[in-house]
Amino acid sequence: MKRVYFFILTLTVSLFATGCGKPSTNTLLQECITFFASFDQDLGADYAFGNNQLFTSPSWSLRGEAVPLDSLTFPGQLEIHRGEGRYRDALWIDSRYEPVFFYEGENNFHLSETVFAGTLSFWLRLDPDVTLHPGFSDPVQITSRSWNDGALFVDFTDRIPREFRFAIFPDRTVWDPLNLEWDDVPENQRPMIGIRNHPFSMDTWTHVAIAFENFNSGKPDGIVKTYLNGVFTGSLSEREMTFSWNPSEVKIWIGYNYRGYLDELILFNRSLTAEEVMKLYSLENGISDLLP
C-alpha cells in the first residue's frame, strides 16, 4: 500500500504528541480513517485496514469470480485523469451495469454485530442531466446483497431533471416487513433523503458525506445525517438500522451505471460531527493535509 506505513507512524507520533492536550480536528479525523482512495496514482486505495485492491467481475451475481485490477486503467471505463481531480488527479468512470467494480468491505468498512457508526465521504464532478447514461446511476454503493436489503448508497434518479438521493436501507425485513413492491411503499417510509436542487456540475466538484450512528443497536434509534459541500441536507432518525451483513461479503461498489468523475473516497469508523464534515470539505489539499 502506497502510504500505509507512513500513516501508521504519523498516527502514533500524533497520538503521543497530543496525549497531554486536546487533540486537533486534523488528528481526530486522521485517527478514525479506515479506507482512503485518492486516485492520484492508480486504482488501489492509498490506505486500507483491509485489502486495498480494486476488483472487477462480469456482473454483481458473479462477484465470486472477481479479479484485481493491477493496471492504471480499465480501458474505456476507468481512467486516472491527471490534474482533473478535486485534489491532483481523479478517477474518470464511464461504466454501465456490467462489468462491476468494487473494493472489499471487510475491515475497510467499520462493521460490528453490535452498535457501530461511521462516515462515508467522497467528491463527484458531473452534470447529471447531460453526463449520465439512461437509467438509475449509483456512484458509490456499500452492500453485501442488494440495493434494498442492507445497503448504503447514493444515486441519481432516471428521469430528467435527475434527483440526487442518499439511501440507507437496513435489512429488508426491518424497513419493509410486508415485502411491498417499491411503488407501494409510502414515501415517508422509504429510508432515503432526496435532493432536487443539488449543486452537481461538470464545472465544479461537489463533496458528499453520510454520517451515521447507532446501527445494529436493535432499537429504533438509528441516526443518519447527510451533507453536500459541508452543508447539512437532511436526516433519518428514530429508525431501526439493522445490517446483518457477513463482513467477508460486503463490497464498496463504485461506478454502477455512472459516467463522471470520482475523487477522494474515504471511510471513517465513527459518525463525524457537522463541524468535522465542514473541516473535511474545507481541507486545502484534501486528506493529504492529514498524511505525510
Image (spheres, rainbow, N blue to C red):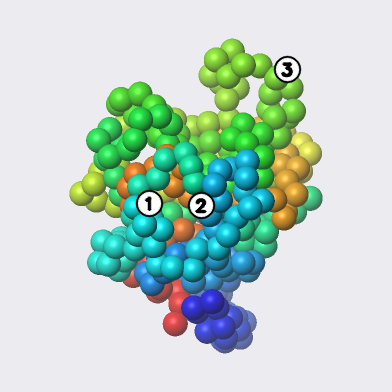
Indicate the quadrant where residue 50 lies.
bottom right
Indicate the quadrant where residue 198 lies.
top left
Give the x, y percent position of residue 168: 58, 37
Q: Is residue 258 left or right of residue 57?
A: left
Is 95 or 268 nearer to us in this picture? Answer: 95
Residue labelled with disc 3: 178
- Of tags 3 and 2, the one toward the viewer is 2
| Label 3 or label 1, whichever comes before in sequence order | 1
Amino acid marked by disc 1: Gln
Is 133 or 48 nearer to us in this picture? Answer: 133
Amino acid marked by disc 3: Leu
Q: Is residue 292 above or below residue 149?
A: below
Tell me which residue sits at (75%, 49%) in the image. 246
Tell me which residue sits at (29%, 45%) in the image. 126
Residue labelled with disc 2: 101
Residue 105 in sight here: yes
Tell me which residue sits at (52%, 84%) in the image. 6
Q: Where does the N terminus fall, quadrant-wise?
A: bottom right
Q: Is residue 157 above or below residue 88?
A: above
Q: Is residue 118 left or right of residue 288?
A: right
Disc ID at residue 194: none
Give the x, y percent position of residue 85: 30, 61
* SS at mark 3 in the image: loop
- Disc 3 versus disc 2: distance between alpha carbons? 32 Å
- Disc 3 versus disc 1: distance between alpha carbons? 39 Å
| Label 2 or label 1, whichever comes before in sequence order | 1
Tell me which residue sits at (56%, 51%) in the image. 57
Residue labelled with disc 1: 77
